[in-house]
Amino acid sequence: MKFFIDTADLDEIKQASDWGILAGVTTNPSLYAKTGGKLADFEDHMVKICKIVGEDVPVSAESTAETTEGMIAEGEHLASLAPNIVVKLPICEESLPATHKLAAEGIRVNMTLVFSAPQALLAARAGARYISPFVGRFDDIGDDGIEQLSTVVECVKNYDYGYWDEEGGPEIITASVRTPHHVTQAALLGADIATVPFGALKKCVHHPLTTEGLAKFAADWAKVTGEAK
Ligand code: E4P
């Protein structure tokens, strides 16, 4: 499973990129707003992200247009900003024809706010390069996000779609990830990607037994060096 980072924070993206594990970045209007960024700086900000990660690493930039025509125009414009921009569109009646048109032009779409298998199947048929089922938001309302994800993965992987075959698409991005447990479960289910906020990514690095083991090694090594107190 590949790791994307789910943030628009440049420092977090730089750090995760330096870890050598980063295969992509996903942003959304809320994540951009969190950086304190203004509308006038949005495009520059997306280009900065693209430069940090390098042009082989896809960066999802979300369109806020509400009509099919608007999504197509904004999608074409966003895609022209950098070769690694992926246009993020929310699943809806307007975005399906927009995705179909953008895919025909070779522009990659990440279909977001996916909460059901039928939505995911429609996204795949319309030509989405990436499909983003949300996990954490199901948990937030007392549902089981991982169970929902498993249905999406199984349904989508049952078929071929004739789009993005050479790139191995459409790929499923497990989104709205909150915990290392979500990451493990996504990998067990065979999701292609997990997009993980930096805080949760850091939690994935650590384990209490690793911390304990390190302390023990340090204490024992201090006996060897004679520095033990
Ligand atoms: C997907 O790409 C979204 O950015 C995302 O994962 C949102 O998750 P949230 O539920 O943490 O806002």
Image (spheres, grey):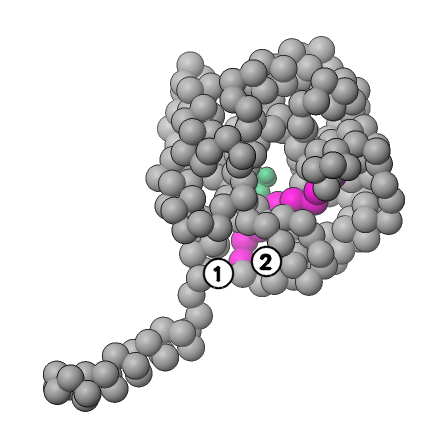
**What predominant SS class does the magenta segment belong to?**
loop
Q: Which residue is drawn at 68% across and 15% down?
A: 72
Q: Which of 60 and 133 is in front in this view?
A: 60
- What is the three-letter code of the residue carrying label 2? Val
Q: Nearer the viewer, residue 90 or 80?
A: 80
The part of the chain drawn in magenta is: 170-179
Magenta-drawn stretch contains 103: no
**What percent of the width, then of the height, locates residue 60?**
57, 31
Q: Residue at x 48, y 50 (%)?
A: 21
Q: Mark 2 points at which residue?
A: 183
**What percent of the width, then of the height, locates residue 148?**
75, 53
Residue 58 falls left or right of residue 135: left
The answer to whether mark 1 is within 8 Å of ligand 1 is no
Mark 2, secondary structure of its residue: helix
Q: Mark 1 points at which residue?
A: 204
Name the residue furthest front: 166
Q: Do the residues labelled 1 and 2 touch (CB within 8 Å)?
A: yes
Residue 222 falls left or right of residue 14: left
